[in-house]
Amino acid sequence: MSLLLLGFEAGALCQLHLPTESRQTQPDKMLNIFHNPVLNFLKLALVLLFTLFLGACAPEIGDTCERSTNCPAGAICDTTTPDGYCTINQCTPGGCPDESICVEFGQRTSFCMKWCESDDQCRSGHQCVREEGQNVGYCYAKS
């Protein structure tokens, strides 16, 4: 379809070409870019990278903290430990998050502590304490 326009100042005759396609086909063309395998791969890679980034930043038992909001959901910040220690108070065996174990300190006190097999798995200033006969230990502040 063409529309004729007169240019009065220049005295020239101009033609304006309007698209002949219906507006309904344009969204289909836009959606085709979302079905592009290369773009889909890039989008998936970005989502995975972002997920890994968030996962790496998620607080865990044994992390440093200043207040309980720096710790995982349900955990508290033990500020009596140097630089704080994210833990869960009054745990039960098997009731701690995956990266931690329940450790009893006396008859009525227990905490979720970051588990370890060696000192290098603990943060700076902490050591891996193992009870005799146990394969794994827990990270505890060096004295």
Image (cartoon, rainbow, N blue to C red):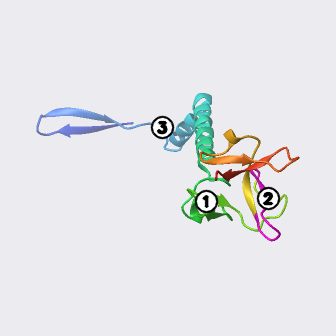
* Mark linked to residue 81: 1
10 Å crowding of disc 2: few (<14), some (14-19), many (20+): many
- Specify the amino acid type for callout 3: Glu
Give yes or no for residue 101 being in the magenta stretch: yes
Q: Magenta region: which residues?
A: 98-110
Furthest-front residue in view? Answer: 143
Marks 1 and 3 sit apart, C-alpha to C-alpha, by 70 Å
Residue 72 in sight: no
* Residue under numbered circle 3: 21
Please provide percent x and percent y for residue 81: 61, 59
Please provide percent x and percent y for residue 116: 74, 45
Q: Of residues 61 and 81, which is closer to you in this image?
A: 81
- Specify the amino acid type for callout 1: Thr
* Residue under numbered circle 2: 102
* Quarter residue 87 falls in: bottom right
* Quarter residue 109 falls in: bottom right
